[in-house]
């Protein structure tokens, strides 16, 4: 059976086309101001990559903050539910999923069979989400893609106490004025976001193994900081930003099969 | 999944409930025009006591009044900003800040009855939490030194809990004497202050009405065990409020009798608050008053919030029955069952009142956990939504521990951050998104009826 999952995130729309549990095609499109149009374009590209016609897709399920705007989906599932379902398929031994997207960080305890045991979401603040790293990269005048590698060259840990992306920027400016080396500032940024995420994950109860998903999982500096905070290894995926879309496509297959 | 649709209909007493509430605020505002007395105090205060001064003595209770301000978001924002401008910290109790703001602005939340804030003649309050202990000290200062009397009611927990089990502990005689002595002194103080002779028979009637109101409200809450639930929590907020306004009044006790009859009739006829009811939850603490739509949102999933320890136990009085169930506290069959002497009737009043469920967590969160688990089991709940209420330190005290206890007892628990009286601390979109995820964990999807 062929299904599709559409993850309408705050920044990007990700689409996965799945055939019998295997990813056949995927695409990522900037969400922009028209999420519905972005979702349609992402689906078109994913189908093209999979060399599959739209008429062969049995069911489409949307997830993500903009899931209600996806006009092409048959049903919707929350990001929390999509992650839990994806984990049962990708790494059933995982019991805690940490999902850090552009504007939201989540910690989800799962049962390995696709069900959510408990969850927590960051509160009213970007300091536990990808937007935080983007803002800090701008403050450091470093491309976001290079921020992770830069932090790996750090030689000292510097505490950052800011609870908010806006005030953290002031803190970074203060560090710049103190002539703090850029790698150390980059590490401080990742340590700060990792602290927030770890604290949230502890609220739902951390149970190993722990998976990190979402676009921020591509940031090696953040991964290191989170590993150090959690004092354990993390399960990572080659395309961490597509995990939610995979979960949605799996839900589509589950529900299409009745 | 098949959607069961229950019959539903409007509450017949709805308009009367609204009229009574408005009349309360009108009576307070216009008391002086009618030669009466105005007094202010909290919704938890021992409000039977000032009633001994006469039938023309009108009160304004601070928390429901502040909640009314919070419901009017533009006015609330002006009140909050006025307190901040006056130098009060933004993280103080938001009810308190709304209330103070109204005084600072010299505006009444019900301008049809008074354009300006109707200053009370005296303040009669009790210390239920740190904020309440200081609230009226500031009010008295802001109002130019309005006389203020406060009763300390910290006499120890009324229940003992061991895990999910709990039992009531009779109030120690010296504790009763301690509170009664303060009440006797308060009566002398009121007599001197107002120049009115105190009437014990009016006090006796007020105590009896208090017992009627609080017992009957618990009986109404008990009816929420029915499937489908006859009331939803949003409606319960509009009905429990009468107890917070005047639980010792004849009008409140009589209204609750009428309400009980109607709700019982709804149960007998299977009338639902939420026609699609499939799943039942409860909430906790005061809601974000400006965003009660949260409870309507649940209905799209076929989910009804049947109440909370807050709605059940702030006004309702309960007891352990002989068969071990937790039920409405037995009300004396008639006023004649109460002692005729002042000290004796006050002792009965204190023993009846100082054990309300919503008071117990101030002593230890495990007491609240035991009560919440009892509600979850006996009212047949599927989950619990906890409001991490940043506007009330008192009722949020220990709430994270309550969450763990409820989870340990096998319940799914969702938390959301907010503030009962400061809309700036509530994120509507995120809360709804969180509810979506929680409903999914309860195997619910949005439905159309």
Image (tube, coloured by chain):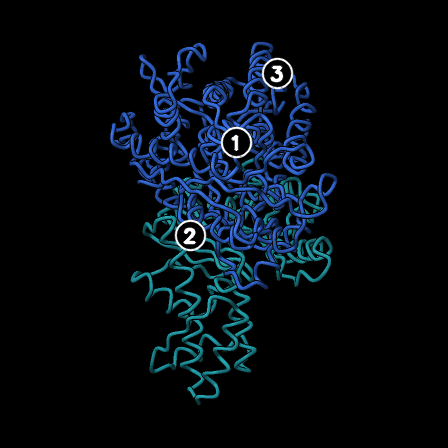
Q: Depth-wise, is mark 1 or mark 3 nearer the camera?
A: 1
B53 sits to left or right of A48: left
Residue at the image position 50 percent from the left and 36 percent from the top: B43
Q: Which residue is the site of mark 2?
A: A97
Provide the letter of the chain coloured cyan. Answer: A
Residue at the image position 62 percent from the left and 37 percent from the top: B297
**Is disc 2 in the same subunit as disc 1?**
no
Q: Residues within 10 Å of mark 1 (few under 14, many from 20)?
A: few
| Visible residue check, residue B303 | no
In the structure shown, which secondary structural element does the residue marked by tag 2 occupy?
A: strand
Q: Are marks 1 and 3 in contact (CB under 8 Å)?
A: no
Q: Quadrant of the N terminus of chain A?
A: top right
**Is disc 1 in the same subunit as disc 3?**
yes
Tag 3 subunit: B
- Cα–Cα gap, marks 2 and 3: 42 Å
Q: Is residue B391 above or below residue A28?
A: above
Q: Nearer the viewer, residue A154 or B405?
A: B405
Q: Nearer the viewer, residue B298 or A84?
A: B298
Q: Nearer the viewer, residue B418 or B331?
A: B331
Q: Which residue is the site of mark 1?
A: B196
Q: Which residue is the site of mark 3?
A: B271
Q: Residues within 10 Å of mark 2 (few under 14, many from 20)?
A: many
B348 sits to left or right of A241: left
Task: Locate residue B174, reporting x and y percent.
Answer: 25, 31
């Amino acid at each position: 059976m062929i299904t599709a999952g559409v993850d309408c995130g705050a920044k990007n729309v990700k689409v996965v086309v799945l055939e019998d549990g295997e990813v056949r095609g995927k695409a990522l499109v900037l969400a922009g101001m028209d999420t519905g149009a972005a979702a349609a374009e992402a689906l078109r590209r994913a189908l093209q990559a999979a060399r599959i016609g739209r008429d062969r897709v049995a069911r489409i399920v949307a997830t993500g903050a903009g899931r209600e705007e996806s006009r092409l989906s048959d049903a919707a599932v929350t990001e929390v539910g999509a992650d839990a379902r994806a984990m049962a398929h990708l790494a059933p031994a995982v019991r805690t999923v940490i999902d850090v997207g552009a504007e939201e960080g989540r910690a989800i305890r799962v049962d390995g069979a696709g069900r959510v045991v408990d969850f927590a979401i960051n509160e009213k603040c970007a300091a536990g989400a990808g937007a935080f790293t983007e803002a800090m990269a701008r403050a450091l005048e470093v491309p976001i893609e290079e921020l992770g590698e830069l932090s790996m060259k750090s030689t000292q840990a510097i505490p950052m106490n800011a609870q908010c992306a806006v005030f953290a920027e002031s803190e970074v400016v203060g560090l710049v004025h103190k002539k703090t080396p850029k790698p150390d500032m980059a590490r401080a940024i990742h340590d700060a976001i990792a602290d927030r995420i770890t604290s949230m994950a502890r609220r739902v109860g951390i149970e190993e193994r722990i998976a990190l998903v979402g676009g921020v999982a591509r940031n090696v500096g953040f991964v290191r900081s989170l590993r150090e905070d959690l004092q354990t290894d993390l399960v990572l995926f080659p395309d961490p930003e597509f995990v939610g879309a995979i979960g949605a496509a799996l839900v589509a297959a589950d529900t299409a099969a009745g | 999944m098949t959607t069961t649709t229950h019959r539903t209909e409007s509450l017949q007493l709805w308009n009367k409930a609204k009229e009574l509430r408005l009349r309360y605020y009108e009576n307070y505002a216009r008391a002086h025009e009618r030669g009466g007395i105005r007094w202010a105090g909290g919704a938890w205060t021992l409000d039977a006591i000032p009633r001994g001064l006469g039938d023309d003595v009108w009160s304004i209770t601070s928390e429901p009044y502040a909640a009314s301000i919070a419901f009017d978001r533009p006015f609330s924002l002006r009140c909050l900003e006025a307190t901040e401008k006056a130098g009060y910290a933004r993280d103080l109790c938001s009810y308190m800040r709304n209330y103070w703001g109204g005084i600072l602005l010299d505006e009444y939340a019900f301008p049809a009855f008074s354009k300006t804030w109707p200053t009370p003649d005296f303040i009669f309050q009790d210390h239920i939490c740190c904020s309440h202990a200081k609230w009226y000290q500031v009010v008295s200062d802001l109002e130019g030194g309005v006389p203020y009397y406060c009763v300390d009611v910290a006499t120890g927990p009324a229940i003992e809990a061991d895990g999910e089990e709990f039992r009531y502990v009779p109030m120690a005689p010296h504790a009763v004497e301690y509170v009664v002595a303060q009440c006797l002194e308060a009566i002398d103080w009121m007599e001197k202050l107002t120049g009115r002779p105190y009437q014990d028979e009016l006090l006796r009637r007020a105590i009896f009405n208090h017992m009627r109101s609080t017992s009957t409200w618990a009986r109404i809450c008990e009816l929420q065990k029915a499937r489908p639930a006859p009331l939803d929590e949003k409606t319960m907020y509009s009905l429990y409020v009468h107890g917070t306004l005047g639980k010792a009044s004849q009008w409140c006790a009589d209204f609750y009798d009428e309400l009980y009859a109607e709700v019982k009739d709804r149960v007998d006829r299977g009338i639902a608050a939420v026609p699609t009811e499939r799943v039942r939850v409860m909430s906790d603490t005061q809601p974000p008053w400006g965003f009660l739509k949260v409870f309507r949102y649940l209905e799209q999933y076929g989910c009804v919030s049947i109440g909370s320890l807050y709605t059940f136990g702030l006004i309702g009085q309960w007891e352990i029955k002989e068969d071990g169930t937790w039920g409405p506290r037995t009300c004396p069959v008639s006023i004649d069952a109460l002692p005729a002497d002042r000290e004796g009737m006050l002792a009965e009043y204190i023993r009846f009142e100082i054990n309300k469920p919503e008071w117990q967590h101030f002593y230890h969160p495990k007491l609240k956990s035991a009560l919440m688990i009892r509600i979850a089991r006996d009212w047949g709940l599927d989950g619990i939504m906890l409001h991490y209420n940043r506007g009330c330190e008192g009722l949020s005290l220990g709430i994270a521990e309550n969450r763990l206890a409820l989870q340990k007892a096998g319940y799914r628990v969702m938390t959301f951050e907010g503030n009962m009286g400061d809309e700036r601390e509530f994120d509507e979109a995120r809360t709804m998104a969180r509810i979506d995820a929680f409903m999914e964990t309860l195997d619910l999807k949005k439905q159309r009826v």
